[in-house]
Image (cartoon, helix red, strand yellow):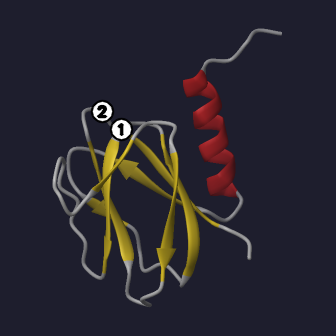
Amino acid sequence: MARKSTSELTEQHLASNYKNGGYGIAISSASAATAVLPAGLYRVCSTSNCWVVQGSAPTAVADDADCAYLAAGAIDFVAVHDPTDKLAVIRDSADGFLSIVECDE
């Protein structure tokens, strides 16, 4: 069996998470936001380097102090408490896909 690259494994992992009830958002040169997220803890992972921000009307801006940098393949956690919060994302240098999966309690 041929060994799969990290990018292939990441793409498969993100696709399977999205199909199993997670949220997904395309990453591009323009800021893109999710719909309102229910309160909870979320695991986020990206296929490309990107910038993420949380808020009621968020706009992600690359290399901005209000945005968190998320490296490709890295996993981070976001706690949503406000019922109006969304996540917005923008690429660092390449398009990709952001997976957002609610963690079980």
Q: Are marks 2 and 1 in contact (CB under 8 Å)?
A: yes
Q: Is residue 56 above or below residue 100?
A: below
Q: Is residue 34 above or below residue 49?
A: below
Kind of residue sitting beneath label 2: Ala
Q: Residues within 10 Å of mark 2 (few under 14, many from 20)?
A: few
Seen as rendered, the residue at the extreme right is 1
Structural distance between the alpha carbons of marks 2 and 1 = 7 Å
Query: In the rendered image, which residue does mark 1 sit on?
Result: 49
Q: Which residue is at a point 30% across and 82% down the rendered structure image? A: 56
Q: Which residue is at a point 35% across and 47% down the rendered structure image? A: 27
Label 1: state its secondary structure: loop
Seen as rendered, the residue at the extreme bottom is 83
Q: Which residue is at a point 50% across and 41% down the rendered structure image? A: 74
- Total numbered labels: 2
Kind of residue sitting beneath label 1: Asn
Q: Quadrant of the image for the C terminus? A: bottom right
Query: In the rendered image, which residue does mark 2 sit on?
Result: 94
